[in-house]
Image (cartoon, rainbow, N blue to C red):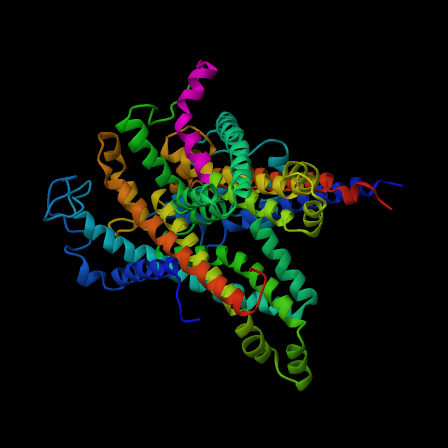
Amino acid sequence: MTRIPLSALIGLTFTGAYFFCAIFAAWIAPYGMAEAIGDSWEPWSQAHWLGTDSIGRDLLSRMIWGGQTTIFVAAAATVLSFSLGTILGFTAAVRGGWVDQLLSRGVDLMMSIPSLISALVVLSVLPTTLPVLILVMGILDSTRVFRLSRAVAVDITVMDYVEAARLRGEKQGWIILREILPNALSPLVAEMGLRFIFAVLFISTLSFLGLGVQPPMADWGGIVKENKEGIVYGIPAALIPAFAIATLAISVNLVADWILNRTASLKGGRSA
Amino acid sequence: MVHPVVKLVAQRIALGLLLLIAASVLIFVGTMVLPGDVAQSILGQSATPETLANLREELGLNVPPVTRYLNWAWGVLHGDLGTALTNGKDIAEAMGKRLGNTLFLAFWAAVIAVPLAITLGLISVRYRNRWPDKLISIVTLATISVPEFLLGYISVYFLSVKFRLFPSLATVFDGMTLGERLFAISMPVLVLVLAVLGHMMRMTRAAILNVLESAYIETAELKGLSPFAIIAKHALPNAIAPVVNVVMLNLAYLVVGVVVVEVVFVYPGMGQYLVDHVAKRDVPVVQACGLVFAAIYIGLNILADVISILANPRLRHPK
């Protein structure tokens, strides 16, 4: 059980490295977030490893600061969507009846509109500040968490030990926290990785459209937006976030796969 | 006695229409979530009381919300989407041509992506866990892990700037021949195909594998049937419904991907129209665009369900 497969190890290393850079951005980044230090679009050099951006800011520093914003927003949105989604999903599964119907139909309705469109509609009247973005993303994404956690919990609520707890006279909170949550944790943790990646892609897309993180704050989608004019002159500055997003997404995916496989085999479960 | 399939289909369509009505309410409410006032947030803090009052009047904010929603919905049913705040033009008119452009783009992306995804899915099932499967899996994982707009710029960088194969902007205008138009949209189509191909191929692979693992396939293998006969006669009829579902879900996803890709390639479609007007806080346009996108999305989902009802042999022969 302690043996970690190579792919998961690679995933863990990269994910860890990104989070490390994000948390300690202030110490790692060679320059400040909005510090102009050179000409626009200087090539890669000793002083500026990734060159400079459209208005002469050090691109490596922008990437590190941007990673901090992107990862923070995505992580916060994921935490929110998970808290909301699992609490409501478990409640729906345990209570059943009209509570379940109401919540499930509500979620069906929210999912009938693509989340990017819903986000755009809401952001047309809300100010684009970080708390608003986190709130919007978290609530929109909690619908998917709701579906998963409800499905998992419905399977668990018919188990004998839940029945036993009910007959013992345990309260709803106990049943959700002590009986269902520990047994539903592994699929949820794997899903958390995927939702986090989705949140990274989502906030990057919003920022790219100019409706997410606002300048001068750096974030990966915004860096693309700021440097996209360079592309037609053959300056690849706008492509660097692509590399960062893709490697982060793939490494989190690898970790999530491993968690899912590990727990499936622990249960003697479906995946052979 | 109505045939049960007809009944199921009618039920599904009715449910879809109900969902659409509810979605329109949601879109309408979505623009009122602000605790304060829409007019205030459109004009900002520096607005004078007079302009605020004017905008409130124009938006009809003095009328109760329910009446406002009913007026709006009544207008939409009669093809009147209202007028844009920013330039006072009729929204339906401005949207008409853009919607055509968007559907044109999505159509060609679908024409290429669907057969390609199914073929790749079949190949990776045929060579499961061998190198073609692994190669396809790695490449599609990479395309899934990059957002569409970045796929767009990566292809612009390599295909338009480095090799000068395709135009980097998708400029279309009246009077272009079909060939010119197709050449103009080659890059956005390519990006859209890449964006949906991964999901579609992976889900197709999973759906077919799911069928191949069932007991009757094992029976067919034990009977000594050829692999081709097993796939054509036993696996395919049962895999149609899930595969169609996969295709439809991804087409719905395509409609959303279009929004971002249009912005990247400055293509005059619905997506760009929507994004522009979100930034300008032009609420009526955003509501209208949101409704159209939601309608297309819900429509495709209904279509997926109806096709899988029709493709299910168990429902076709009632006892």
Taking the spot 59% from the left edge, 39% from the top edge, the residue there is B248
Left or right: B309 in relation to B64: right
State the residue in front, B260 or B189.
B189
Q: Residue extending furthest front?
A: B224
Taking the spot 69% from the left edge, 83% from the top edge, the residue there is A167
- Measured from the top left, where is residue B60 in percent x and y? 52, 43
Q: Magenta stretch?
A: B175-195
- Measured from the top left, where is residue B142 in percent x and y? 39, 45
Q: Residue extending furthest bottom?
A: A168
Q: Quadrant of residue A231?
A: top left
Q: Main secondary structure of the magenta part?
A: helix
Question: Image height check: is A190 above or below A66?
Answer: below
Left or right: A213 in relation to A106: left
Question: Image height check: is A209 above or below B166?
Answer: below
Q: Quadrant of the C terminus of chain A?
A: bottom right
Question: Image height check: is B266 above or below A149?
Answer: above
Taking the spot 30% from the left edge, 50% from the top edge, the residue there is A244
Question: Image height check: is A25 above or below A225?
Answer: below
Q: Residue extending furthest right?
A: B1
- Measured from the top left, where is residue B223 in percent x and y? 72, 45
State the residue in front, B8 or B281.
B8
| Magenta residue check for B194 | yes
Q: Is residue B319 visible?
A: yes
Taking the spot 52% from the left edge, 60% from the top edge, the residue there is A145
Left or right: B207 in relation to A242: right
| Magenta residue check for A58 | no
Q: Quadrant of the N terminus of chain A?
A: bottom left
Q: How many marks?
A: 0
Left or right: B315 in relation to B49: right
Q: Quadrant of residue B184?
A: top left
